[in-house]
Structures are given as structure tokens and as C-alpha cells.
Image: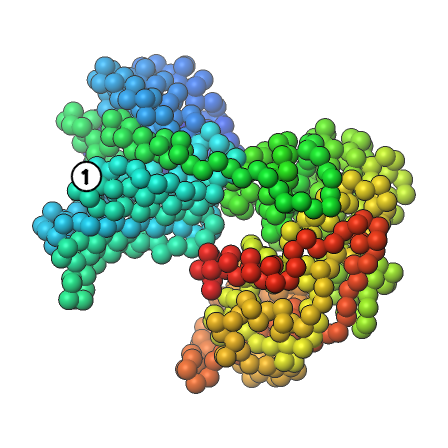
Amino acid sequence: MDFQVCRGILVLGGGAVVRECFLPAIRMLGALERTTVVDTSDSVAEIGRRYPAVNVRCVDFRKYLAECPPEENKWAIVALPNAFHEDAVKLALSRKMHVLCEKPLTLDSLACRRLAEAALAARRVLAVNMVRRLYPSVAMARFAIARGLIGRIREVDLQHGSPYAWPAQSLAPFQTANGGVLADMGVHYLDLAEHLAGELTPREYLDDNRGGVEADVTYRLVSRDGAAVRIALSRLRTLANQVVLVGTCGRLELPVDNLTSCTLVENDGARIELRNASPFTAGDFAVDFAACFAQQLHDFSACVNSGATPHVDGFTAARTIEHIEWAYRNRAPAVTQAQTCASGIRPAPVLITGATGFLGSHLVEELSARGFSDITAAVRSPQNCAAVARFPLRLEPIDLLNFGQVRDAVRGKRYVFHLAYGRDGNRPRDITVEGTRNIVNAAIAEGCESVVIPSTIYVFGSPSGVVDESAVYRPIGGEYGRSKAVMERWCLDRAASSGNTRITILNPSCIYGPRGKTYSELPAMLARDRAFCWIADGLGNANYTFATNVVDAMLVAAIHPQAHGERFIINDGTVTWRAFLEPVLEPWLSEIRSYTKAELIRIEKRRRVRLLEAARTAARNPELRRLVRQTALGEWVAAARRRWPSILNGHTNMEPAPRLDAASQPPAPPSWLADLFSGGMPRFSAEKARRVLGWSPRLDLAEGQRRTIRYLEEMNLR
């Protein structure tokens, strides 16, 4: 690529696609010194540290473009949130720049055409970065199709889905102006489907939008030659993650994460890998995502130098956007009617902390169904927002340890539901204790009507017999249980001087249901991997409550005058762990063995290397790290990390544990299962909640299990 004819590259935006893709590509091509990044977010400081040769400017792109002189040979890469693309492209063209715009060009097909015509009038190149066209695997698939290796295409299936993990630092991917997963990933696959199978016509579209931005999509189209095309996308669940083209003579398989090659599967079953030994004309690069961006820049340069039409110009982009417009016009209307429960709560401004978590997402769903339109969700990171962003709410990053931010967040709110607690980072206890104090004090200062705070039955320990709210604090679960107990005591004391603001604590038992980790997904994942067991034949007591039933209790507590200054155990019922989990684990029941905790500990001592591997896994996995911290193993892991940091961080020459023959000797389950699914015999009583609040579980155990099983099947966990 000859950047010598280019006076410089102006990058508008400093988000993840710039940090992780464009700037590495520009570095490959030796042009960082002539690159300027313009953005108003904190990401410009990170870019300055990672790419010191780049000129970074913390200024609004409109101001920067308005003040810069027209430059005939300068390029603009537009990588702003989707809603700003049209303005940025128009301004860059007006300054005589050639423009490479990150997908989508805009979410308005007419605007795409206007921009394409403006580029022609200005005699500038306008290209759209549909980088998946440049995957070597896609190029080989096009080669195979052109050579007739699979015959006439009859079906195309494109699936790409996993829990959202793109390293975004802003909440732009979850704002309605920027579209949801269809506008984000779908634009790639709609373009790719037409690139491989020809012009498409929409037939049917389904998504899970409930007034916000969709996170799960199924789109069916048909090609001009009659091929059935299905596109499935998700920010919530793991899909097959491959592109499959079925023809009359065979099929092509392209895993979405394999950029290098595709596989030709002939009708007789023969499999042939198709790979290009020299996939890039831009340079001898290793095949990765950034190298495909480098190739895109190379091709863009060639168009600038020759006047050729880009792979994807504004007119081509408009055709893809028409498919997105059709989908959004034809989506099913959002469901807004809630089922009846005892709470008579009426729509009002609400703040929810911990809204992106398991229980929080169910609360958001219920409030939305009840017509609440002024919901503010305090969030920690964009990576956790996909499930709740489907609903009409406002996402706000709030530091619970900053009282000023917290008070601003609660101002004007009638109800505050405080579900957040410390899980990760250096100060989890402070988040649970000091964060709660800030929420409560801010709500009192701003005159909120009520604050409802879910805690846990862990604060009671594991006594025998019937347990009610008069039980003394004997917290279990390590720091998690201890900090919850401290938080509860402070809240109940503060209620004596909270004025007109009511404060209520709820102590739910083991919460299960869709999106639940500990008591829904975890047993299924372990059983699937042959690492689950019954503790003492599963005959200990499971005190359980379905997520929707806990939400009902929260809504009742928010409006009930007698809830002030009280705590309430919320428990649907008590059965054995075997009765609770058997329906969920039905596919694996014949393989599940029984151990006592002592037996598991003895096995672990004989397999110390496996224990260290488990600790390393816990250190790498935030969800498992949180669960393990609530068990006895969590204390061991914390101490071991201080004593043997090199081992638990993976820096060791220790030989890995030998793999066992799964058919003859399955791996032993971890001992911390005994802390989560124990043989204890307490029975937690929700009689006070029934008597004072009038609460009772809306959904019984059988219905809760049915909904949980359906969710696990949707998530491909069962």
C-alpha cells in the first residue's frame, strides 16, 4: 500500500474497533505517524498510551472538521456510533476528504444514497468497511461457488451468537439510535449473504425487542435463484457460529472465527479444506482480524489512486440497509401486559442498581411490562447490558462509591431498588457496604418514597429446623455473607431516622429461573461435563424461590407502609435438592453419582494439581470466581493466591494433570458443590411476608422448573 500519496489519516472515533482493529492495521502498513484520532471519550488517553506515534485530539468531530482546511489527499475513517455516521461523512466530504466509513454507513437507505451521490459530486471515494468480505475463508468460498464445486445453492445458514463480549467502553451499542444486534452484526451477514448467494428478498423477521434494542434475531430471506437464507444472531446465547452453504453437489462450511479457510463437503462425505497460501495483497500478514482491516485500507487506497468503485459503496450499502428497514418495520409488537400479582404498584420514576444481573433483568422486564417508562439502570460495564437493553430504559454508568453521582442518579426517583453488591475488583466489601449506605442516604436526602434491598438467606447461616426473621446473624459464604450481614444491620438501624423514605430488606432463598447462574445454569453445565454430583444423595433441603416471585415481593415491599424498617424472608418452599434439580438434570441423571463433602475433599487432596487448575479457572472466570468466593474453597483460593501467585496465575512449569478416560473414570466434582447444594436441613419460613405483605409465590415449582428447562434449551445448555 502506498500511503505516500496520502497526506494523512483522520480517524473519527476512538472506540474498540479503532483501538483493536484500525490502529493495528495502520501500524502494519507503517502509517501511524500520519494518523490523527479525534474523540471526546476517555479512550483517547488509552490510545495515546498504546500508540504513542498517533496524534490524539480530545475534541468533538464536528468542531474539528469545521476548523480544519480542505485537504485533497487526506482520508477520513469514520468509526463513531452509528447515529453520527451521516453527519461525519457529509462533513468529511465537504472538506475534500476520501471517506472509509465503518458499517453501517447509516441506518437510513435514502441517506446512504444521498451520501453516495454527494461523494460522486465531490469526486471523492466513499467506501463502507464490510471487512468480512475480505476474510480469506470467504474469498475461498466465493472461488468454490464460482467453480461450481457445490452446484446450485439451495440453502444458506448464517449463525453468529455468544454472550456480548465486545470490548466497548461506551453504551452506544445499546442505544436505540444505533440499532441492536441486527444493525451491528446483522449488517455484516446480510451483506455477506448477498456477496455469496446473490440479491435477497426478505420473508420473515423475529427478534426479542421489547422497546429497546434487540439482542436475539432470526431473519429469513430468499435469493433470486430460490435459495432459502436464514440469519440467526444473538448477544445472549451461543449459536453454531458458522456459515453453511448447501448446494446440489455439496456444501461449504465457514466457522465465523476461522478467517483462514473453508471446508468443502462433497455429497459422498469427503471433506476438503480450501485455503489460499497468499491471502493478502496488502502484505505478508498473519491471518487475523486486523490483517483484514489492513487489506481493506489497501483496497481503499487502490480506489483512491485509480478512481475504481469500492467493494461496498453507498449504493451497495443502501441495499443492505433496506433489509434492516424491512425487518424493523415488520417486527412483532412488543409485549406490554404483565401477569397479575398482588402488587398494585403504579408507573413512576425508578432507579435500579444491579439491573444487568440475574434478578435485576427480571425486575426490568416486569416493570416494563407494567408500563414503567422512566427506568434508570445503573450499570458497571457495557458487556453486561444486552439482556436489559431490550427494554425501554436509560443506562447510566454510576460509581456507587461516589456519593455525588449516586445522589444525582436518585434525584426525582420515587422507588429505588438496590440490587448491586460487590463481586469483583479490589473493593467488593466497600461496594456492598459503603455503596448501600450511599444509595440509602442519597434516597433519603432526595425524598424517595422507598428503597428495597434484596439480601440473602446466607446471613442466617445454616441452622436446623424452621428459620424465620428472628434468627440471629451467623453468615456463611465467606466475605459475601459477612458483608451482606453488615449491610443489613446498618440499613435496619438507618430506617429509624429515614424520615418519609421507607427502607426494606428482603432475604430471598436460592433464586432460580431463566438467566440464573448458580441454581440454574451451573448444575446443567457441570452435569453436561460430568462434574456434578449429589451431596449425600441429594436429600438435604433446597429452599428455593423463582426469580419472578422475588420480583413480586420487591414490588409489594416498595409500596407497603408496613414494610418499612423490616426484613422479610422470601421462599417459595422447601424440597430436597434431588427433587429440585432432577427435572433440570434429567438428560444426565444416570451418570450423576453421590458423595459426601468429606469424600470430595479426600479426592481433591489426591488430585492437588486439579485443584490448582480449578483455582486458575476461577481466577479467569468472573462468574465462577464470584461463586467460588461464596464457598469454603474461596477462602483457600484467596490464601493460595497470596502464597503461590505464580502458580495460580498460570506461570508455572508444573505438568498438567493427566486426562482421565471419560468413559471409565469421570472427573471428580469440586468440593465446593457441598457448600452450594448441601445436606443441611433448615426450612426457611416466608410466613411474615405472607402475613404482612400479602405476598405468595405466583409461579409454583413445576412451572418454574418448566421455564428454566426451556431457557436452558434455548441457551444450548441442555
| Residue located at (77% from left, 64% from top) | 684
Question: In the structure shown, which secondary structural element does the residue marked by tag 1 occupy?
Answer: loop
Name the side, left or right, on which 158 lies relative to 567.
left
Query: In this view, which residue lies farthest toward the front?
Result: 340
Q: Quadrant of residue 314?
A: top left
Determine which residue is flagged by label 1.
Answer: 224
| Residue 618, image quadrant | bottom right
Q: Is residue 333 left or right of residue 372?
A: left
- Which residue is at the front of the view, 450 or 226? 226
Displayed quadrant of residue 132 = top left
Q: Give the image location of residue 708, x and y in percent.
A: 55, 59
Seen at 45% across and 53% down, the residue is: 237
* Residue furthest to the right: 496
Tell me: 198 left or right of 556.
left
> 338 and 364: which one is in front?
338
Instruction: Tell me the quadrant of the picture where the N terminus can be found.
Output: top left
The type of residue carrying mark 1 is: Arg
Number of residues whose C-alpha sits closer than 10 Å to that of mark 1, classed few (under 14), some (14–19) or many (20 or more): few
